[in-house]
Amino acid sequence: MNNELERYTLPEGRVYTDGKEMALPSVTTVLDQAPEPEGIKYWKKKYDGTGGNKHWEDILQYKGNRGTMIHYQLLNEFSDEDIHGTNEENSTEQLKLEGNWKRYQEDLAFAREAWDEIKQVRGINEDSVLDVECFVTNLGVGYAGQFDLLYIDDDSNIVLADLKTGKGIYPKYKKQLIAYTKALNLDIDRVEIIRIYPDGEEWEVSHDGKWPESRAELWGEFHELRAGMDDVEERMESILEDGINDT
């Protein structure tokens, strides 16, 4: 685990750097190399801003900002320092400017209620949590990321969890978690996706013990995507340089 990294997010991708020579693509940047699913293409075509429908970019922007803020509100209690940063500042500003602050507050109220139930069910408390929002790197394969939650459950399992606020449990989410396990110097007993979906007022905890895909299969697919990024080092360094110059 490495909390001395800095993260830059730009339209071209997300870069993690130590401010010296290392510039690594994020886990999500690697996963974005995969072809866009047909279902997503259909959804974007449907929500193109015509016929009274919202534009898909506006929908995703709200959900992204909501997700950022719900992550902060739910996980901050387990951090030694306030994890509020630039991403949270930007999301707060955008939610207010777009007139979505009241909607977000309503969604947050449900998320907090769900989180209280989940913490009780899964044994998540100040004594069981090992770390939150922590940077990790895999220098051998060449990527970095930031996991949400590492804790010990009531059965003494070391659990790596990711908090999601979307509609379902998608393969991309699973690969993301497995990539994090490969960047940790720990034996992770269980990986789980904690899904809190305010739009449907539902929540679930999905873990690898019940996934049809094995950890090895998910890692193989992620590794293949990363291996296909031939010029990634040069691109990441360029993105990093542009990001620093723009700030």
Image (spheres, helix red, strand yellow):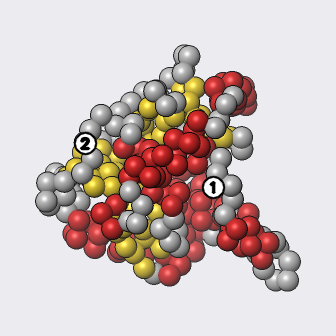
- Give the quarter of the figure containing the C terminus: top right
Q: How far, Cα to Cα, is label 2 from label 1? A: 39 Å
Figure check: 102 above or below 30? below
Q: Secondary structure at mark 2?
A: loop
Residue 179 is situated, as x and y percent measured from the top left of the image, at 44, 44
Q: Secondary structure at mark 1?
A: helix
- Residue 14's disc is none
Q: Residue at x 49, y 75 (%)?
A: 198
The answer to whether residue 24 is left or right of residue 58 is left
Residue 80 is situated, as x and y percent measured from the top left of the image, at 30, 42
Q: Residue at x 16, y 51 (%)?
A: 127
Q: Earlier in the sequence, mark 2 or mark 1?
A: 1
Residue position marked by numbered label 1 in the rendering? 93
| Residue kind at label 2, given as amino acid type | Asp
**Residue nearer the viewer, 34 or 72:** 34
Q: Residue at x 30, y 34 (%)?
A: 185
Figure check: 228 above or below 100? above
Residue 150 is situated, as x and y percent measured from the top left of the image, at 29, 49
- Residue 187's disc is 2
Determine if residue 103 is in view: yes
The answer to whether residue 155 is left or right of residue 140 is left
* Residue sitting farthest toward the top: 20
Q: For residue 40, what is the image quadrant?
A: bottom right
- How many residues crowd around disc 1 within 10 Å: few (fewer than 14), some, or many (20 or more)? few
